Image (cartoon, grey):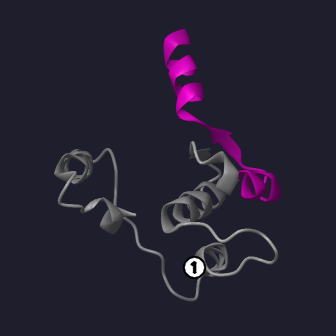
Amino acid sequence: MYDEINIPTIPHLKSRIDQLVTKGSAEIVSIDIGTEEYALYRDLTRNHDSNKIIGKGEATSIFLAKKHNGILGSNNLRDVKPYVEEFSLEHMTTGDILIEAFKA
């Protein structure tokens, strides 16, 4: 996903991520070939049974949420919903996050 934000028209996104990495608030990780995570990533982006093939960003977010028992943050409900259900992932949209922030 890091490579996907290196777009000349939106340099501020990459700059913000770089700042988070420098401060230790985020880290850049790779997907190692031959791992369960890589197999899932390939299935999601190439061919996953009868389900829809999804983009790299969604696939990365799904395998990370699954691997780390985390929360999948995505507004792309059409693409991620089948996988949220299949892998029993907790899911939040931007709206959900804003509601939680407002409560705090």
Left or right side of 89 for 28:
left
Q: Is residue 104 visible?
A: no
Q: Residue at x 73, y 51 (%)?
A: 81
| x and y, in percent, of residue 97 in the image | 54, 27
Q: Quadrant of residue 28?
A: bottom left
Q: Nearer the viewer, residue 47 or 66?
A: 47
- Which residue in the protein does label 1 denote? 38
Q: Is residue 3 visible?
A: yes
Residue 85 on the magenta span: yes
Q: Main secondary structure of the magenta part?
A: helix
Q: Quadrant of residue 53?
A: bottom right
Q: Residue at x 66, y 56 (%)?
A: 79
Left or right side of 87 for 36:
left
Q: Is residue 71 above or below residue 93?
A: below
Residue 53 on the magenta span: no
Q: Quadrant of residue 44?
A: bottom right
Q: How many marks?
A: 1
| x and y, in percent, of residue 71 in the image | 61, 44
| x and y, in percent, of residue 87 in the image | 77, 58
Which quadrant would the N terminus be assigned to in this image? Answer: bottom left
Element at badge 1? Answer: helix
Q: Residue at x 18, y 52 (%)?
A: 11
Left or right side of 56 for 65:
right
Task: Assess disc 1: are there few (<14), some (14-19) or many (≥20) residues with their C-alpha within 10 Å of its C-alpha.
Answer: some
| x and y, in percent, of residue 10 in the image | 22, 51
What residue span does the magenta drawing correspond to? Answer: 81-103
* Residue at the extreme top of the image, as rendered: 103
Q: Amino acid at mark 1?
A: Tyr
